[in-house]
Amino acid sequence: MSRIMASVSKSICLVRSSVNIDETFQVPHIVRPGETISSSAMWARPGGKGANVAAVLGLAGVQVKMLGAVGSDATWPIDCLKERHVDTTDMYVSPDVPTGRAFIQISSEDGENSIVLLKGANFATNTPLDVPNAWFSRNEQQITHLVLQNEIPLACTMAFVEHAASLGNVCTVFNPSPMLTPDELRAFPWSGIRVLIVNQGEAADMYRALSGRDAGSEPAKALASLPAFASIQWIVVTRGSQGSCAGVLVGSERVWADTQAAKTRTVVNTTGAGDTYTGYLVAGLMSLHESDSLTSERIKAIMHRASVASAMAVEVDGAMESIPSAKEVDARIALLG
């Protein structure tokens, strides 16, 4: 039986990751080195890759708990998560370190973005969040899925990976963004990961760092060929306008599935697209029952739903604000036929 599969009524996802405030500047184009340009608008919204994915899961209709930190200077992102059906009971408020920030440029030319991060409370030390064994079984709720990224201290991420692996019944999803250094990639406990989600450039960089060779035209398959990744059940690579592909272990065989990118009506803001894809993919995994047969068609259906949600997210301003609900995604899928 796959460790990914669980009864949907019992599936609970823990997101141990970042919470930020996104301070966004509308600019004519992404600023070049040495250049000073004027912004036509500025706004502040909740964000952080972890908070975004948690919000996606909440809006997708699955149970999700956010485990992250904010500073006492700005706690309002917690309220935004609550509004999106995220359990924030165990959020930590740091009295000493400010809430993390993301300073985002949005190009008026093509909607592309550039992001600079301030770690803030996401990297607060000596907090209750540092000890993973306290968070997997609380109030008779058993965590079945764990989502991790790379916007909190790597030592904390690795501790959560290793603890979840020791339990044996937790599906750990890793989206290593921002990308780890080559030394960090080599030291990471990949055997504890069940689902790896990266974009095509990240996949190529990871393969080069771990093998010393170029990934070629199929970085997903290149990654899957590495011994360190042999036990990762889902290796998912997103490819922007070219869609996404996944290599999924079904028994002893890795089954490959490709999906086309869903059509977007108009591109307004790409900031939350990747997090929306990740969240809906995880929601799809959480929907699997123990009795489900994991076929290529089922894999493609999960990926397609994530792709449609991601395409819808770029049509709306903001990261968390752009996330479509499950009802909206299903309506778009029905419309697409």
Image (spheres, rainbow, N blue to C red):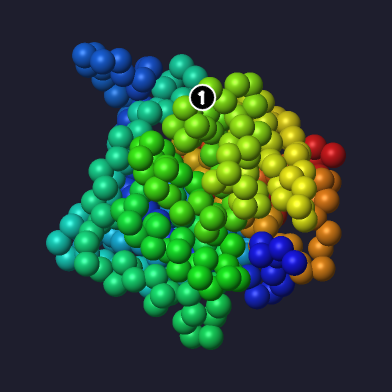
Residue 271 in the image: above or below residue 189: above
From this view, report whether residue 298 is shown above or below residue 162: above
Say left or right for 163 vs 1. left
Nearest the viewer among 75 and 63 is 63
Residue lying at the far bottom in this picture: please name it. Answer: 140
Q: Where does the image place residue 294, in percent across and percent down from the top left? A: 80, 55
The quarter of the picture where the C terminus appears is top right
Q: Is residue 105 above or below residue 14?
A: above
Relative to the observer, which residue lies in front, 25 or 119?
Answer: 119
Q: Position of residue 183 (x, y in %)?
A: 35, 40
Which quarter of the image is occupied by the N terminus? bottom right
Q: Which residue is at a point 25% across and 68% down the rendered structure image?
A: 127
Q: Measured along the vertical axis of the image, is residue 56 above or below residue 142?
A: above
Residue 42, position in %: x, y? 31, 34
Looking at the image, residue 180 sits to the left or right of residue 212; the answer is: left
Q: Could you say which quadrant of the image residue 184 lies in?
A: top left
**Residue drawn 46% across the image and 61% down it:** 161
State the residue in front, 138 or 70.
Answer: 138
Which residue type does callout 1 highlight?
Answer: Arg
Query: Residue at coordinates 63% horizontally, 40% vertically from top-left?
Result: 224
Left or right, residue 131 beside residue 61: left
Residue lying farthest to the left in this orientation: 96
SS at circle 1: loop
Q: Is residue 133 left or right of residue 266?
A: left
- Which residue is found at the position 38% from the left and 17% from the top? 29
In the foreground, 211 or 28? 211
Residue 129 seen in the figure: yes
**Label 1: how many residues lie within 10 Å, few (<14), some (14-19) or many (20+)?**
few
Asked if one can make out residue 86 in the rendered structure from this viewpoint, the answer is: no
Residue on which disc 1 sits: 213
Percent across and percent down for residue 189 are: 46, 54
* Number of marks: 1
